[in-house]
Image: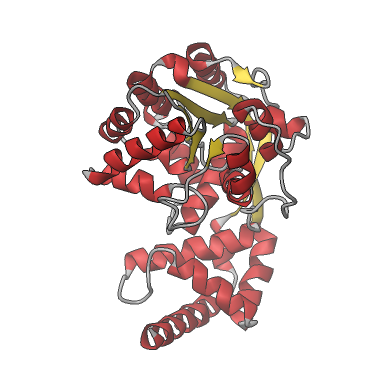
Amino acid sequence: MTRVVIHIGSHKTGTTYLQRGFVALRPDLRAAGIDYPVQWQDHLHGHHSLVRLLAAGDAETPARLAVLAGEAGHGGRALLLSSENFEDIEAAAIGRLASALHGHQVEIVYFLRRWQGLVPSAWQEAVKQGGSETFPQFLLAHMLRLADSPLLNPGITLGRFAEAFGRQAIRLVAYDRLVEQGEELLGFFLRAVLGVAVAPPEQAGRINRALPPADVEIIRALNAAAQRSPDSLPGGVWPMRLFFELGRHGLPAIATLRRVMAQHVTRQVLPTMPALRAVERDVIARFGPALPGDVPEAAPAEAEHVAGTYWMEPSVPAAFAELRAAIRQTHAEAALAA
């Protein structure tokens, strides 16, 4: 029997930082009895391709995973897998994962984050991936379907994993308590989750830092334009990529939009809400306790975003037209070069 630790997220809880640390420490982890496999890491530092293949129903992937787990166990080592995308897969894919690891000691590690910090971060990530909802739209959409929103109700995700692996397999980590106590995330994971005496490497702090409100709004507006008129702008992550590329080259339109939008930044109050606190308590009661302790109730918080009133500024339409034209040209040049 092999110990298999599967870190499933959640999104926006330092996952990329942790995964980059696991890669940097791969030889040290192996010496300490933990395999962090190179398989399924064709994108960044996590095992995101494993999740994709399981979700697609690839027939070979469960067999390959079973062999990998068996080899680790025969060598007296545990197996560590990590991808925040695990929390997005459906029950059928989790079932394939459970079948591949049948007979092994599986631990499902989930970092639980308070909604006041999670929702703004999740919205920014959605925008970076091509989303076009404003922050109030994003927040309202999840609030109106609290019972069905995995973002606000992690019990949905954890329930699927508990059904496949058993409730006893779930290990919760209180992300906010770690941050408030000044804990180094990777060091805590190595010590308290994996139980190994491996020192974390020097890393450059957080990887996916929050973008300034103006930059998020510019990218969101470009995404919305691409969705309304697919022939006029490239979609997906292209608006974000080309926005940053043109910003590095000093496109005047970007400076104009940033300057104007800075005057329209608003702060959305995120109050304490009994319904959401009840969800947190229910999750801990069903799947806890949480390490290193309970999730404390948060004080009201604020989330910054740019109000739509900036469109009334005379310079905005021309600046956006210049930016869109520059994106089209840069994308066409990149296509020709490819």
Q: Is residue 89 above or below residue 16?
A: above
**For the point 56% across and 29% down, which residue is it?**
112
Q: Is residue 287 above or below residue 67?
A: above
| Residue 124: image location, x then y, percent | 54, 51
Quadrant (top left/top right/bottom left/bottom right) for the C terminus: bottom left
User: Which color scheme did the rendering employ for the protein?
Assistant: secondary structure
Q: Is residue 59 above or below residue 79?
A: below
Q: Examine the rendering and report whether any part of residue 143 can be seen.
A: no
**For the point 68% across and 38% down, which residue is it?**
185
Count how many numbered circles sit on residues in the image.
0
Q: Nearer the viewer, residue 37 or 167?
A: 37
Q: Residue furthest front?
A: 75
| Residue 196: image location, x then y, percent | 66, 31
Q: Examine the rendering and report whether any part of residue 18 can be seen.
A: yes
**For the point 32% across and 70% down, which residue is it?**
229
**243 left or right of 331?**
right
Q: Nearer the viewer, residue 250 or 8?
A: 8
**For the point 58% across and 15% down, which residue is it?**
289
Q: Nearer the viewer, residue 4 or 318?
A: 4
| Residue 335: image location, x then y, percent | 37, 83
Q: Residue furthest right?
A: 182
Quadrant (top left/top right/bottom left/bottom right) for the N terminus: top left
| Residue 215: image location, x then y, percent | 60, 63
